[in-house]
Image (cartoon, rainbow, N blue to C red):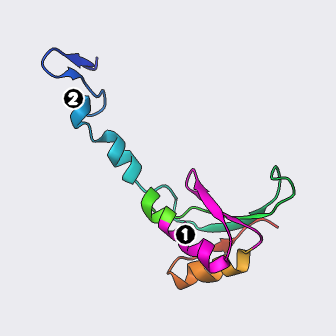
Amino acid sequence: MALVYSTETGRMCPDCRQPLADCRCKAAAKAKAVGDGNVRVSRESKGRGGKTVTLVRGLPLDADALAALGKQLRSACGSGGTVKDGVLEIQGDHGERVMAELARLGHKPKRVGG
């Protein structure tokens, strides 16, 4: 049974058993790398109103590093995009350019899909 409240400190985190004000669980989960290390580059247009996007999955980076890499790739492609759930989305069909840039940065990307 997990302690969820203490009369001395108030609410307690059920995972680390520290007061919620001192809890580090969420910060540690946010800093954890998202991807599996197999960098996959694909192209998708379903559910996007006919617009094509280039997706990059599996990058073994935390959220901040993933956002920085996304900015670097978007500027290399001259395009917009975003990061959603650990997946980089770059507007347009930029598969070859993204793969070249990832290889230049030391990743080993693979092309998947059609």
Ranked by sequence position, the earlier of labels 1 and 2 is 2
Q: Is residue 59 left or right of residue 7?
A: right
Q: In percent of the image, x 59 and y 81: which residue is there?
A: 101
Residue 7 in which image quadrant:
top left
Residue 95 in view here = yes
Above or below: residue 14 compared with residue 111: above
Closer to us: 18 or 114: 18
Numbered circle sitting on residue 71:
1
- Number of other residues with Cα within 10 Å of mark 1, as a class: few under 14, some 14 to 19, many 20 or more: some
What are the residue bounds of the magenta stretch?
A: 68-93
Q: Is residue 37 left or right of residue 15?
A: right
Q: Secondary structure at mark 1?
A: helix
Q: Amino acid at mark 2?
A: Pro
Image quadrant containing the C terminus:
bottom right
- Number of other residues with Cα within 10 Å of mark 2, as a class: few under 14, some 14 to 19, many 20 or more: some
Residue 9: x %, y % from top left: 16, 22
Residue 51 in which image quadrant:
bottom right
Numbered circle sitting on residue 41:
none
Q: Which residue is mark 2?
A: 19
Closer to us: 14 or 65: 65
Q: Is residue 54 left or right of residue 34?
A: right
Closer to us: 114 or 86: 86
Q: Is residue 34 left or right of residue 52?
A: left
Q: In percent of the image, x 24 and y 17: which residue is there?
A: 5
Residue 60 in view here = no
Closer to us: 76 or 109: 76
Residue 73: x %, y % from top left: 59, 74
Q: In percent of the image, x 52 and y 58: which residue is there?
A: 35
Q: Secondary structure at mark 2?
A: loop
Image quadrant containing the N terminus:
top left
Total marks placed: 2
